[in-house]
Amino acid sequence: MEKHLAPSREYLAQRGHMVSFLMMALMVTAWLNVFQDTVNAAAISTYF
């Protein structure tokens, strides 16, 4: 029984890492979008 459970537990752990990695990637992407919008607004107000 233990032999059967080990792979699925490992699989779940890998999936957990993937999910947390995807969440981090989404957060970074959203933060970059906000940062880019801020930079664009600052550049527009500076140059125009």
Image: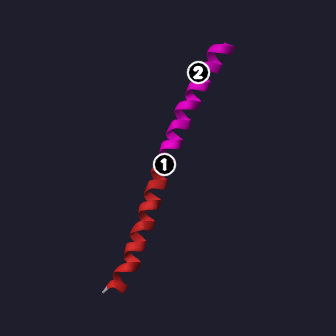
Q: Residues within 10 Å of mark 2 (few under 14, many from 20)?
A: few
The quarter of the image holding the N terminus is bottom left
The tally of labels here is 2
Label placed on residue 6: none
Q: Residues within 10 Å of mark 1 (few under 14, many from 20)?
A: few
What residue is pinned by disc 1? 24
Residue drawn where x is 63% and y is 18% of the image: 44
**Vertical placement of 32 versus 42: above or below?**
below
Q: Give the structural element (helix, strand or loop) at label 2.
A: helix
Earlier sequence position, callout 1 versus callout 2: 1
What residue is pinned by disc 2? 41
Residue 13 pos. (x, y %): 41, 67
Residue 26 pos. (x, y %): 48, 46
Instruction: Please name whichever residue, 26 or 12, is drawn nearer the observer in this view of the structure.
Output: 12
Residue drawn where x is 41% and y is 79% of the image: 7
Query: Which residues make up the magenta segment?
Result: 25-48
Residue 38 pos. (x, y %): 56, 25
Quote the CA–CA distance across marks 1 and 2: 26 Å
Residue 19 pos. (x, y %): 43, 57
* Camera-side mark, 1 or 2: 1
The secondary structure making up most of the magenta span is: helix
Q: Give the structural element (helix, strand or loop) at label 1.
A: helix
Magenta stretch: residue 39 in it? yes
Residue type, numbered disc 2: Ala
Q: Is residue 28 left or right of residue 11?
A: right
Residue type, numbered disc 1: Met
Instruction: Please name whichever residue, 41 or 28, is drawn nearer the observer in this view of the structure.
Output: 28
